[in-house]
Amino acid sequence: MGSLHTTLLLHTEVRWLSRGKMLVRIFELRMELMAYFIGHKFELSDRLNNMAWLSTLAYLADIFGKLSELCLALQGKQVNILQAKDKLVAFSRKIQYWISAVEQNNFECFQTLSDFLEESKVDLDMEIRDGIKTHLSSLQQSLGDYFPNLENQDIYWVQNPFKIKEKPKGFHSMDYENLIELSSEGNNKFKR
């Protein structure tokens, strides 16, 4: 059928980080799966002809892919708390952007979904669009629940001590005075 994949394995146990790739593969193989299920009856095979279900699958493939990218970016020995916090803040801001894009019927940020809608020449059902917005809002809320102090600026003095105008919380007076001296030295100012 011209597919990039040559083998279809039936495997039900998938690790969390691989789910995005698995959903993309199911989506890519939907025609092959339909052909397979013609000869092998399966109670859910009718979903592969359902545009609403396929649109939802395409969205889930995209969002799981984005979550997998975030998880991978937060792992490793070289990642420190400042970098992790920056990645989480950026992801939170991306979710806000995605919500506003979906409200405007713009799905470019979800490549699989966007390509599917363009290829099918259909508009996304309003109910599915609202479901995507609700899911993204829930994801935003969950991110805030897991990481409640994302917007807290208390540790950013480490990245750029020259921007500090007042004593960070938890700093001793002597430490803050040393930071003032360090940030006021002429040679250091030019290295910003």
Image (cartoon, grey):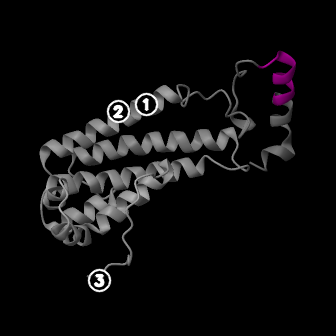
The residue shown at (45%, 51%) is: 13
Verify whether residue 175 appears in magenta.
Answer: yes
Q: In which quadrant of the rendered image does the N terminus lie?
A: bottom left
Q: From where the camera sits, is residue 65 visible?
A: no
Q: Secondary structure at mark 2?
A: helix
Give the number of callouts.
Answer: 3
Residue 172 rendering spot, x and y as whole percentages: 82, 17
Mark 1 vs mark 3, CA separation in Å = 40 Å
Which numbered circle lies on residue 2? 3
Q: From where the camera sits, is residue 47 visible?
A: yes
Q: Nearer the viewer, mark 2 or mark 3?
A: 3
Figure quadrant of residue 176? top right
Q: Which residue is mark 2?
A: 138
In the rendered view, tell whether residue 157 sits above or below residue 44. above
Q: Nearer the viewer, mark 1 or mark 3?
A: 3
Three-letter amino acid code of the residue under disc 3: Gly
Q: Residues within 10 Å of mark 2 (few under 14, many from 20)?
A: few
Q: Residues within 10 Å of mark 3 (few under 14, many from 20)?
A: few
Residue 10 rendering spot, x and y as whole percentages: 37, 62
Q: Earlier in the sequence, mark 1 or mark 3?
A: 3
In the rendered view, tell whether residue 43 sits above or below residue 127. below
Verify whether residue 129 appears in magenta.
Answer: no
The residue shown at (23%, 64%) is: 116
Q: Secondary structure at mark 1?
A: helix
Three-letter amino acid code of the residue under disc 1: Ser
| Tag 1 and tag 2, C-beta contact below 8 Å | yes
Three-letter amino acid code of the residue under disc 2: Ser
Which contiguous range is marked in magenta? 171-179
Residue 23 rendering spot, x and y as whole percentages: 36, 57
Which numbered circle lies on residue 142? 1
Mark 2 vs mark 3, CA separation in Å = 38 Å
